[in-house]
Amino acid sequence: MTLPNILGKEFDCINKIIAVLPVGGRIGDDCAVIKWGGKNLLLSVDTFVENVHFDLKYFKLNEVGEKCCEASLSDIAAMGGKASYVTLSLSVPDHKIIGAIIQGVKHSLVKHNVKLIGGDTTFSRSIVVSFTVIGESKRPIYRSGAKPGDSVVVSSFTGLSYGGFYALKKKIKGFKKLETKHKLPSARLDIAEKISKVATSMIDISDGLVSELYHIAYASNVSIVVDKIPVDPELKRLGEATGIDSRTMACYGGEDFELLYTRPSKAKSKVLGHSIGKVIRSSGANLVYLKNADGSLSVLPGNVGFKHFK
């Protein structure tokens, strides 16, 4: 078992690990799925490191706790599940800051009706936050189920988190919505189970829309044609103010934690989100195309978004 390297060295690291360690089940989706007592248990772990995943120049400590928790719970949403429990590991340079961090965690857990069941605390030079999340799903949705003819849907606008990060970094005022989307995203557990009833594949948008489209394309052995990229009005306004193409931000900005999924084009249930394209057969390479105004197709590069390793 190996995973394709489409976005840098992250998959190289995973492949080295799974080549040595005994592996149970499938690896490569947002959660592990374990059959237990007649249920599909979902398990995932996420780790966040200061100055890599968050910067205290822009974040309050409670915002760090809430964002890390929401990002972790998003893995359960990506599988069409319901989150139930978390464990929390905190490594901090000063124990006095833990209280502020967990206020943000509390806000997230209460919002989604999730309970803490354990964890660990240790000393470190910088803040490191790690969650293990546990949930369940009646019908887990993997990345590998997309079929030619399926519609491609994203649950809401993308690129907002990146826009907020950029505005914060450059100290550009007037983009409160984008800043909030960056600092306080929300896992889409509110719609995940409903989407799972019709979805053929699904993933959450952590590394960027195009990156996640490639994940689905590779896992499902298909290609994807994107015929439109919805852009939030405030992100468009940021683009006009800075000269940065807002569609590029929508394509490659990460950490939106919206859900990207495919569904049968003839499905009768309501589309939750924006329909952005179609799944097509692969012609040997699993590519993501942009349909141009004249009907021609351009390949969208898949190595532009967030990279876990340089």
Image (spheres, grey):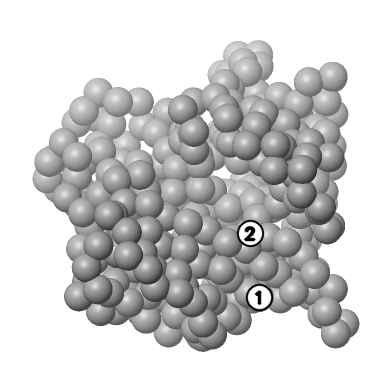
Mark 2 in CB contact with mark 1 (< 8 angstroms) = no
**Which one is earlier in the sequence, the residue at label 2 or at label 1?**
2
Q: Nearer the viewer, residue 97 or 264?
A: 97
Give residue 298's mark.
none
Q: Within 10 angstroms of label 2, few (less than 14), some, or many (20 or more) residues?
A: many
Q: Which residue is mark 2?
A: 78
Q: Residue at x 19, y 31 (%)?
A: 241
Q: Amino acid at mark 1?
A: Gly
In the image: residue 9, left or right of residue 141: left
Q: Residue at x 83, y 58 (%)?
A: 24
In which quadrant of the rendered view does residue 283 lie? Answer: top right
Q: Nearer the viewer, mark 2 or mark 1?
A: 1
Position of residue 53 relative to residue 131, above or below, is: above
Q: Amino acid at mark 2?
A: Ala
In which quadrant of the rendered view does residue 69 lie? Answer: bottom left
Q: Position of residue 209 (x, y in %)?
A: 54, 39
Residue 272 in sight = no
Position of residue 214 relative to residue 100, above or below, is: above
Q: Residue at x 83, y 34 (%)?
A: 221
Kind of element beneath mark 1:
strand
Residues at marks 2 and 1, CA–CA distance in whole angstroms: 11 Å
Give residue 135's mark.
1
Q: Position of residue 6 (x, y in %)?
A: 64, 28
Q: Position of residue 276 (x, y in %)?
A: 61, 40
Kind of element beneath mark 2:
helix
Quadrant of the image containing the N terminus: top right
Q: Position of residue 108 (x, y in %)?
A: 41, 75
Count of marks placed on residues: 2
Q: Within 10 angstroms of label 1, few (less than 14), some, or many (20 or more) residues?
A: many
Residue 123 in sight = yes
Q: Residue at x 71, y 37 (%)?
A: 15
